[in-house]
Image: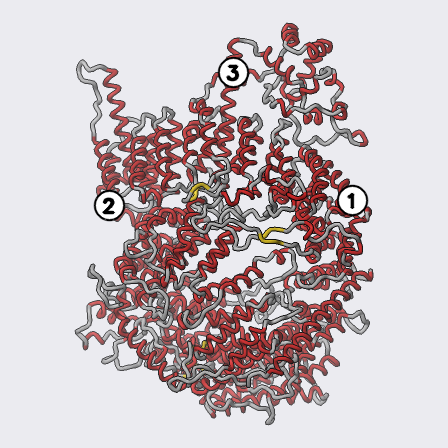
């Protein structure tokens, strides 16, 4: 496909493809030929082997090893499963299968591949398989399934349901939250990966089955909707959907998108749906028509960035979950191509986002913006690769018309190009910009590279902006391969490589390490790709070269100068680097090296190495000479500068060992020999010169051993003499020389890493180095030159080991036999050299052969296998003809015993022994840390250098060689896994002594080595357990240090404690020992003990007790032995290495499994029993008691009931004095109650199902679920009828296949039981709860305040109470009634919180109570609830809201109708603003949980609340708006109809309130506000007024008032704030008034009692009466004021209040103004409520904005800037902010614009301004929708252009800004913009008459002049908009506009002011890059602008 030509004449894809096409074909052919040969060689066709193995020097021996190992794995894995051996069998052999795949890939036949997958799949889906095994097996399955192209659905079919059931059981189980199952932290991601890999193999019928399973969960108001969408996203198969669309995606596509269109207001499940759609788009490119959904999805994509585009800077936040940028990018990329409009939308999206990518605009959104850009380009290049280069074995191949054409690629690159150029200079985005540029340049180098090169040149010339330089360097090195590659479309690219390379050298700067490091990276990247060969003379002999090639050839003449200058700069850095000595008393040798110095060393060495590796011999000689001259005679300190210098020298010897060593080694050896001759042994410290030269020597000898042989005798002699010196730095440096010498002689490694195997020393008359620029390596012809240690090198190494190691062992032997005395330093030196000998030659030190210790009994073979790492027989460096490692072990063992007995304080030697043991145990050729670091480095380099277009193998040769070396090293690392022998046991014993030593540094090292050993050798920890238990006992012979060491060993690291091992025997031994251990109260012990407790609590996973494997799984394992016939002389399956298990073995395996289950069960019982004994003993320290309780709680499981003894401890701990113990017990009680929950019987209920066209929401078939009095259970029969469904999502949409409900009470477990009928566990709980003392204490503790102001409703306490009431029924309630009532009455915050937790637990727990119990419950509870609702406080209202919401959750509303009806009893009683809003709040919580099933209740509430929408109290109105938004939450319109037919409709409300809001369309009259303000002055009452007041009262009340007299009334009035009477306010409806009780009457203060006559008190509300008398507290102290106090007007009878108010304002005008005031306030309050409603609906409800809401737009706009009503203005502002940022459906767009148009024609300029602001945000938010609706977009432009000519200057200026924003975002097309520009130019060009004509009417002239000025001003504003729309560049049309505006600087006002502002803004936004911008202006234009922008000099 790569060579085809498209119709437009462009090459198909980039030139890289064309150039490589033939190479790719050759590579494919080579690969296929190689595969055929391999099949014959192996005897079978491997699925996918790791290709790097074939280039290893011992490749011939690997095949036999891999085949036999797989046969062994196959046999033992099959046997483990057939014999049902979970541990260690299945665990071990699945791990080894994983290891096999890592080393060899899938190197086995297809039949074996399929059979192993099927076996593991059936095993992983075993019911109740423990989470660890699921995670472990899933990891192996992921490795087997990862290469999808190897198996298609004809080869493999996997059933989805077992996988789903396992996924549901582990990740969605309520048992996890209760703590009854503990799962591994990584299991979530592992299982998701498994499902992702399995779903391609699900059967065709899967989709329909899944839909049937999960459709019943699809209720948009319920959390189950998110669960359903999550399942659809994860499980629905799409990979092969193209085969049968009608049975796959067409079944769900319209349905799910219908739900999305109905609930499009950012629902939480939206990301899941889009992820599914993105996957569908990728797997079925071009098969789905996405055009209808483009605006919808692109609008969401734009919203996901959370850009700061807000109405009036009012950020109302984002609801739901933001989209993932990866999902968005995936969908966009896979819908490109063909006739899709995606590219148009994408280009418009980037145009609108462009300014946010600018480096000046950085915010939280920046990271997501650049991430999206990077992901987009990544997915795009992968798609091109997939369509043009990837060979597919199965899956959908899109037809040519739906693939990406070259034109598509060009358009894509052009659309991303502007933003990536902006991002590359961003401080946050330049990394993402680098990866994006790499992708784009690979696709279209001619579009990307010129600008990048130009920018780097410019940055190199600028010294003031270092970030621009580093960012440019990074960007160019990201596209390095594209730049060096010969390109037809950008042939001059290569000509820039060398000039840039030479130009960046100044970046190596001693004073700026950041810049230096990026420069090193730049140089090394290009050096790896470009041969450093001077071929400038090549031009003369080859005239056929192109001009570009000739230029490059001439440029290569500067290579020599480049290397010299590079080295000069490196030398400067080295000479300026030294170790930082902070303290004078600390030697420089002890000072640590900084990270910066390490970076210098690594950066410089890797760069120099890359240059030399690619250099010709001539240039190498230049570098060698330069370094040699520089280093000669220098003495540097060895830690920093010396090390860096040595690193540079090492590069020379590494690249050309023969020359490098000849040039450098003799000099170094001469100097060292000269110093050593003078005698160095007697010196305590080496001199600086010797240290530096030793550092040099240790580095330059790191070469393949064959090159070292000529010098080995001198090195040998030196080492022998230096080994006898024993200073600290001498040991380090001499040890390094020894180690590196031995490694050089013994390690197999590649000799070179050139990009061309032939090298660069070829004849330049025939060789053109340009052909090797950026050349890819070929894995099939790498021609690696491996160095394999020969016989001579092995012999030399053996001699050296004997010379160094032998004497050291003899010396230590004599020392331990007391035949020789050694100082501490000498001993440490000897141990150090032994360790260095092992690390140097360990690859040839064979492992000892010894008696194997059987750590774990097994029915399968567990012995370890070693891997070939050397061709032929592996040499063995013996010691005295015996195994060297074993000899060292014996010497170290004796030494340790001797030291501990004689010199226990010699910590150096003890630490040294630990190090030696570490090397002996784990070192087999390469240190693991070094290997891991190199692997990470390789991955990073590969990622930076890979060509994503051509695939991962098209990387440069150097990286491929490195990967092959890593493959060799990974085999060596694998050899450290060995069988555990008696010698290992001896080492463990010694390490245990060291890990429990007296000295902390010794302990730490010992613990580190031993901990690693326990991880490395499976089950070896079991040997240590008995000894650790001994150390934990209280014994005078056990020291504090041994105790501490033992604790640390048990603790382990990173959560891997011995207590969390999957071994019940270990836990049974250690756990009780740890709990009883209490040696010390030292902080260190407390710290480790606490860490142990935390580790067990957080990391102890659920381990199997009773393992049961289905017979079919065991039988399937036996199929591994099925014989498969050969085909074409190739085996179709490998024969297992063991015979098939016999029937007897299988029976024995079953028996063994049963025995293990019994043993585990008994051990668990013993552990729990022992823990209980310890906790009951009373001997434990409180900290240990806490730990014991925590561990006992952690041991609570779903499959084993805790014994009564443990339950008793837990339940008694509910009243423990320690809060930690109480909390643990409370949490555990919920689990215990769950354990003791008796199963409830369910029955199937028949449902009338209609399969076709099911309408979501209210339907005839789900009517029986609705909340209504007809469905309330009123009798026992009705209570027991099968009509109650507690899960609210059932019935909303599809019914489940089998609809189950709970059976009648007589079939359920009996709750009214005697003590004899209860189990022992239940009895303990019940008896505790029946004890009044216990209950009193429990309630006291539960109602204690813990953290003032931070305590919240505790769900754990709720779960405990729920479990108690569920399990024991009404019996436990009897004792709790009185305490619960007291708690409800108490005003304390903590008491009410406790009551709320109990109350919710009670209501939820009574789910299965009998009818009689339920009746009794509610007959008592209803009055309590009524009383409670008047008693809540400010602090506890949230808790009560959660209480009622929790009580209502997952409960059939008809079964809790008592509670709902109590909450519905007049939610507004005007008992004060707080209580009213409180009642609404709790009602809202309960109501929201019932979702769609309480339609009738919502109607009732709607009708009840409507009259209160103008409630006088702000907080009540706020809550009203919130509740109303809940009431209308069901008003969802699905494509098939409404989903809330039985619920209130928001359009009805809008229709009802609109007429009442008409008055809000008029600006408020300031007069009535002044009147109101004046009316609030101090109320003065004259005698006449007093008489008038009395005459207006009832006779009874009038008499009371007269008796008290005028003065008394004045004294009461004076108590009001400000001494004035407030307005009477809101008079409640008559039905809400209550006659107060006698008790209440007593609380009225005496001075007010006189004001009330008999019967008068009915006018006062109970709340008022309750509040009027201070609650006296003991001691006569002043009471704390009660929250929620009634307003002051309630201190007087309402009638008296009204009379005073009426008389004091008794003037005709006052009455009229008062009436107007009340009318206005009523409208204000109504509008405020509507604002809250609008905000609530848009921010909380799932459906998109309703068209009816735009009807209130006018009122909102008119009042959003009201100065007289600031509260209203604020609410309108928020409502407008919500409306402007909401996503508007396409069908509503026209309605919204009509509303905007209407308001924009208003007479109020403030309303017009508001609409312009609204329009700006509205358009930006819905940009994609407007782009798809061109007519609506034109209407927007019309509105703005009309308002730019408005009479009011504020409106014109605002319209100008909005127009500028729209132009900037490319909302206005170029064509329309051009017309507008012409129009504005015309308007500004019209002349304005300065004087009237003769006899012309002056007023008419003035009017015409004003109009002309207005038109010109509008034109100037329009032109200004064009200027402001280009803040960061100067497009071609802009200079002319600027000149045109400059002409009007002296025009009539306000034109000059506008012009000045524009030029100031232009200067501000363009000054940063003015040097670049001014190039686009002519000299005249520049002069004009300078005059305008630069202030004239004072001295001019």
Q: Residue at x 57, y 51 (%)?
A: 1245
How far separated are the C-alphas under marks 1 and 2? 87 Å
Element type where label 3 sits in the image: helix
Q: Secondary structure at mark 2?
A: loop
Q: Position of residue 86 (x, y in %)?
A: 61, 74
Q: Quadrant of residue 1516?
A: top right
Mark 2 closeness class: few <14, some 14–19, many ≥20 residues within 10 Å: few
- Dot 1 or dot 2: first in sequence order is 1
**The N terminus lies in quadrant:** bottom left
Q: Which label lies toward us, 2 or 3?
A: 3
Q: Which mark is residue 1375?
A: 1
Location of residue 25 with respect to 1340 vertically, above or below:
below
State which quadrant residue 1161 falls in: bottom right
Residue 101 image point, x, y percent: 48, 76
The residue tagged 2 is 1932
Q: Nearer the viewer, residue 989 or 262?
A: 262
Q: Nearer the viewer, mark 1 or mark 2?
A: 1
Q: State the residue in front, 606 or 1696.
A: 1696
1220 or 165, which is in the foreground?
165
Q: Position of residue 697 (x, y in %)?
A: 49, 80
Q: Is residue 1219 left or right of residue 957?
A: right
Marks 2 and 3, the one that precedes in the sequence? 3
């Amino acid at each position: 496909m790569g060579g085809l030509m498209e119709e437009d004449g462009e090459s198909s894809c980039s030139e890289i493809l064309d150039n490589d096409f033939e190479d790719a074909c050759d590579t494919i052919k080579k690969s296929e030929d190689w595969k055929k040969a391999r099949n014959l060689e192996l005897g079978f066709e491997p699925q996918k082997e790791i290709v790097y193995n074939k280039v290893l020097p011992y490749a011939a021996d690997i095949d036999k090893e891999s085949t036999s190992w797989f046969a062994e794995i196959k046999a033992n894995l099959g046997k483990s499963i057939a014999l049902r051996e979970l541990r260690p069998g299945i665990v071990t052999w699945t791990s080894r299968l994983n290891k096999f795949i890592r080393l060899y890939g899938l190197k086995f036949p297809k039949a074996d591949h399929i059979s192993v997958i099927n076996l593991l799949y059936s095993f992983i889906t075993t019911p109740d398989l423990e989470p660890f095994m699921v995670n472990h097996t899933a990891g192996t399955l992921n490795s087997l399934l990862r290469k999808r192209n190897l198996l298609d659905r004809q080869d493999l079919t996997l059933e989805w349901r077992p996988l789903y059931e396992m996924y549901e059981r582990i990740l969605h189980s309520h048992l996890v939250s209760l703590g009854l199952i503990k799962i591994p932290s990584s299991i979530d991601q592992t299982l998701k990966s498994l499902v992702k890999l399995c779903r391609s193999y699900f059967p065709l019928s899967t989709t329909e089955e899944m839909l049937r399973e999960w459709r019943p969960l699809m209720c948009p108001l319920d959390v189950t909707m998110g669960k359903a969408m999550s399942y659809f996203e994860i499980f629905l198969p799409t990979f092969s959907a193209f085969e049968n669309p009608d049975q796959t995606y067409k079944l769900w596509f319209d349905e799910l998108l219908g739900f999305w269109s109905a609930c499009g207001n950012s629902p939480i499940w939206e990301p899941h749906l889009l992820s599914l759609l993105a996957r569908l788009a990728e797997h079925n490119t071009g098969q789905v028509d996405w055009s209808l959904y483009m605006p919808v999805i692109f609008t969401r994509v734009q919203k996901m960035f959370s850009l700061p585009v807000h109405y009036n800077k009012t950020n109302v936040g984002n609801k739901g979950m933001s989209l993932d940028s990866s999902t968005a990018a995936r969908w966009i990329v896979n819908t490109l191509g063909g006739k899709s409009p995606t590219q148009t939308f994408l280009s418009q999206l980037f145009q609108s986002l462009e300014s946010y990518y600018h480096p000046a605009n950085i915010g939280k959104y920046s990271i997501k913006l650049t991430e999206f850009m990077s992901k987009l380009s990544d997915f795009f290049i992968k798609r091109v690769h997939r369509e043009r280069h990837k060979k597919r074995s199965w899956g959908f191949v899109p037809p040519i018309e739906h693939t990406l054409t070259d034109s598509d690629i060009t358009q894509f690159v052009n659309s991303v190009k502007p933003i990536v150029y902006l991002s590359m200079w961003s401080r946050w985005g330049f990394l993402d910009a680098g990866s994006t540029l790499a992708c784009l340049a690979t696709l279209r180098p001619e579009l990307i590279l010129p600008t990048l090169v130009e920018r780097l040149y410019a940055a190199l010339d600028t010294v003031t902006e270092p970030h621009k330089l580093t960012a440019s360097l990074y960007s160019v090195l990201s596209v390095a391969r594209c730049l060096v590659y010969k390109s037809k479309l950008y042939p001059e690219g290569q000509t820039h490589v060398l000039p840039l390379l030479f130009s960046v050298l100044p970046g190596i700067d001693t004073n700026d390490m950041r810049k230096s490091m990026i420069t090193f990276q730049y140089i090394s990247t290009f050096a790896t790709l470009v041969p450093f060969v001077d071929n400038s003379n090549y031009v003369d002999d080859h005239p056929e070269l192109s001009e570009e090639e000739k230029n490059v050839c001439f440029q290569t003449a500067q290579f020599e100068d480049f290397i010299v200058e590079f080295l000069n700069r490196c030398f400067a850095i080295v000479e300026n680097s030294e170790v930082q000595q902070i303290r004078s008393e600390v030697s420089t040798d002890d000072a640590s090296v900084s990270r910066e110095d390490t970076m210098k060393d690594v950066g410089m060495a890797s760069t120099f190495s890359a240059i030399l590796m690619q250099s010709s011999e001539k240039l190498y000689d230049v570098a060698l000479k330069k370094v040699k001259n520089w280093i000669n005679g220098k003495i540097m300190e060895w830690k920093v500068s010396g090390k860096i210098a040595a690193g540079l020298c090492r590069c020379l010897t590494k690249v050309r060992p023969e020359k490098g060593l000849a040039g450098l080694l003799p000099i170094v050896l001469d100097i060292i020999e000269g110093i050593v001759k003078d005698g160095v042994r007697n010196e305590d410290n080496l001199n600086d010169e010797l240290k530096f030269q030793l550092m040099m020597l240790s580095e330059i000898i790191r070469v393949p051993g064959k090159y070292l042989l000529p010098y080995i005798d001198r090195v040998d002699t030196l080492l022998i003499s230096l080994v006898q010196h024993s200073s600290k730095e001498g040991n380090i440096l001499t040890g390094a020389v020894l180690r590196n010498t031995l490694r050089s002689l013994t390690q197999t490694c590649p000799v070179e890493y050139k990009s061309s195997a032939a090298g660069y020393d070829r004849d330049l008359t025939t060789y053109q180095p340009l052909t090797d620029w950026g050349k890819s390596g070929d894995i099939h012809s790498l021609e690696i030159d491996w160095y394999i240690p020969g016989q001579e090198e092995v012999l030399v190494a053996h001699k050296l080991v004997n010379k160094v190691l032998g004497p050291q062992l003899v010396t230590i032997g004599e020392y331990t036999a007391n035949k020789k005395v050694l100082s501490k330093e000498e001993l440490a030196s000897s141990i150090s050299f032994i360790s260095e000998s092992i690390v140097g030659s360990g690859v040839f030190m064979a492992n000892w052969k010894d008696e194997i210790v059987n750590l774990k009994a097994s029915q399968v073979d567990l012995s370890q296998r070693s891997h070939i790492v050397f061709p032929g027989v592996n040499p063995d460096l013996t010691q005295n003809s015996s195994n060297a490692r074993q000899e060292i072990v014996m010497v170290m063992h004796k030494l340790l015993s001797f030291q501990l007995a004689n010199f226990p304080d010699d910590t150096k030697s003890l630490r040294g022994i630990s190090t030696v043991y570490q090397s002996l145990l784990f070192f087999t050729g390469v240190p693991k840390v070094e290997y891991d670091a190199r692997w990470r480095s390789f991955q990073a380099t590969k990622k930076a250098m890979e060509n994503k277009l051509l695939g991962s193998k098209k990387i440069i040769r150097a990286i491929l060689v490195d990967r092959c070396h890593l493959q060799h090293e990974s085999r060596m690392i694998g050899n450290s896994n060995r069988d555990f022998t008696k010698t290992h046991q001896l080492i463990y014993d010694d390490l245990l002594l060291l890990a429990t030593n007296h000295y902390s540094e010794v302990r730490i090292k010992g613990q580190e080595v031993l901990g690693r050993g326990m991880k490395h050798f499976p089950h070896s920890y079991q040997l240590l357990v008995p000894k650790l238990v001994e150390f934990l006992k209280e014994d005078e012979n056990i020291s504090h240090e041994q105790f501490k060491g033992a604790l640390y060993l048990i603790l382990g690291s990173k959560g891997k404690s011995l207590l969390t091992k999957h071994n019940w025997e270990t836990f049974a031994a250690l756990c009780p020992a740890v709990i009883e251990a209490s040696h010390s109260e030292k902080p260190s012990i407390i710290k480790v003990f606490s860490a142990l407790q935390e580790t067990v609590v957080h990391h102890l996973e659920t381990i199997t007790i009773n393992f049961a494997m289905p017979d079919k799984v065991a039988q399937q394992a036996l199929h591994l032995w099925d014989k498969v016939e050969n085909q074409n002389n190739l085996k179709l399956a490998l024969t297992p290495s063991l015979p098939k298990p016999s029937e007897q073995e299988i029976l024995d395996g079953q028996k063994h499994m049963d025995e293990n289950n019994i043993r585990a069960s008994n051990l668990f019982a013993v552990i729990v029993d022992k823990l209980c004994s310890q906790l009951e003993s009373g001997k434990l320290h409180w900290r240990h008691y806490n730990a014991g309780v925590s561990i006992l709680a952690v041991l609570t499981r779903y499959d084993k009931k805790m014994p009564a003894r443990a339950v008793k401890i837990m339940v008694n701990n509910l009243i423990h004095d320690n809060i930690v113990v109480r909390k643990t017990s409370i949490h555990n009680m919920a689990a215990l109650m769950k354990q003791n929950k008796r199963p409830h019987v369910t029955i199937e209920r028949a449902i009338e199902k209609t399969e076709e066209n099911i309408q979501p929401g209210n339907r005839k078939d789900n009517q029986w679920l609705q909340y209504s009095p007809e469905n309330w259970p009123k009798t026992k029969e009705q209570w027991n009828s099968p009509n109650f469904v507690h899960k609210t999502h059932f019935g909303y949409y599809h019914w489940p296949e089998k609809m189950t409900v709970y059976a009648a009470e007589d079939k359920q477990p009996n709750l009214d039981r005697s003590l004899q009928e209860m189990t022992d566990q239940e009895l303990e709980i019940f008896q505790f709860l029946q004890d009044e003392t216990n209950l009193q204490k429990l309630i006291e503790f539960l109602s204690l305040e813990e953290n003032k102001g931070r305590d919240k409703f505790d769900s754990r306490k709720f779960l405990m109470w729920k479990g108690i009431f569920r399990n024991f029924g009404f019996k436990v309630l009897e004792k709790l009634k009185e305490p619960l009532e007291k708690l409800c009455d108490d005003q304390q915050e903590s008491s009410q919180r406790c009551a709320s937790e109990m109350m919710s637990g009670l209501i939820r727990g009574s789910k299965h109570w009998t009818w009689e119990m339920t009746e009794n419950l509610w007959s008592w509870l209803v009055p309590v609830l009524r009383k409670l609702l008047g008693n809540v406080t400010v602090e506890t209202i949230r808790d009560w809201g959660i209480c009622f919401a929790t009580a209502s959750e997952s409960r059939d509303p008809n079964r809790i109708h008592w509670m709902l009806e109590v909450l519905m009893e007049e939610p507004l009683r005007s008992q004060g603003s707080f209580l009213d809003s409180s009642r609404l709040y709790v009602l809202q919580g309960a109501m929201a949980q019932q979702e769609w099933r309480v339609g009738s209740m919502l109607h009732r509430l709607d009708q009840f609340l409507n009259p209160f929408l103008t409630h006088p109290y702000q907080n009540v109105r706020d809550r009203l708006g919130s509740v109303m938004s809940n009431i209308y939450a069901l008003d969802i319109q699905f494509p098939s109809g409404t989903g809330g037919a039985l619920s209130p409709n928001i359009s009805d409300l809008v229709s009802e309130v609109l007429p009442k809001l008409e008055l809000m369309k008029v600006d408020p009259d300031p007069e009535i506000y002044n009147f109101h303000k004046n009316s609030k002055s101090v109320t003065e009452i004259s005698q006449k007024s007093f008489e008038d007041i009395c005459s207006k009262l009832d006779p009874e009340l009038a008499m009371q008032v007269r008796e008290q007299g005028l003065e008394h009334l004045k004294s009461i009035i004076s108590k009001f704030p400000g001494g004035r009477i407030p307005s009477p306010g809101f008079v409640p409806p008559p039905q809400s008034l209550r006659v107060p009780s006698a008790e209440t009457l007593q609380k009225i203060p005496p001075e007010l009692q006189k004001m009330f006559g008999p019967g008068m008190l009915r006018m006062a509300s109970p709340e008022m009466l309750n509040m009027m008398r201070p609650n006296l507290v003991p001691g006569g102290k002043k009471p704390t004021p009660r929250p929620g106090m009634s307003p002051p007007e309630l201190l007087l009878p309402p009638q008296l209040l009204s009379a005073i108010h009426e008389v004091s304002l008794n003037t005709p005008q006052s009455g009229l103004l008062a009436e107007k005031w009340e009318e206005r306030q009523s409208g204000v309050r109504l509008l405020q409520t509507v604002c809250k409603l609008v905000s609530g609906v848009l921010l909380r409800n799932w459906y998109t904005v309703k068209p009816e809401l735009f009807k209130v737009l006018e009122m909102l706009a008119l009042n959003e800037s009201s100065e007289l009503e600031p509260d209203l203005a604020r609410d309108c502002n928020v409502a407008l902010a919500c409306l402007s940022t909401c996503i508007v459906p396409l069908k509503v767009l026209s309605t919204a614009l009509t509303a905007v148009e209407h308001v924009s024609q208003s007479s109020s300029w403030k309303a017009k301004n508001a609409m312009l602001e609204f329009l700006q945000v509205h358009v930006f938010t819905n940009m994609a929708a407007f782009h798809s609706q061109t007519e609506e977009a034109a209407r927007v432009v019309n509105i703005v252009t009309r308002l730019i000519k408005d009479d009011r200057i504020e409106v014109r200026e605002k319209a100008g800004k909005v127009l500028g924003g729209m132009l900037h975002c490319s909302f206005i097309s170029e064509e329309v913009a051009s017309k507008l520009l012409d129009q504005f130019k015309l308007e500004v060009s019209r002349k304005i008459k300065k004087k009237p004509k003769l006899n012309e009417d002056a007023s008419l002239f003035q009017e015409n002049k004003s109009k002309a000025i207005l038109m010109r001003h509008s034109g100037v504003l329009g032109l200004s908009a064009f200027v402001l729309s280009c803040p960061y560049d100067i497009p071609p049309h802009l200079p002319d506009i600027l000149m045109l505006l400059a002409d009007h600087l002296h025009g009539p006002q306000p034109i000059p002011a506008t012009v000045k502002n524009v030029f100031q803004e232009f200067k501000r936004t363009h000054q940063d890059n003015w040097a670049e911008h001014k190039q686009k202006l002519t000299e005249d234009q520049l002069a004009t602008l300078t005059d305008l922008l630069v202030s004239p000099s004072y001295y001019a």
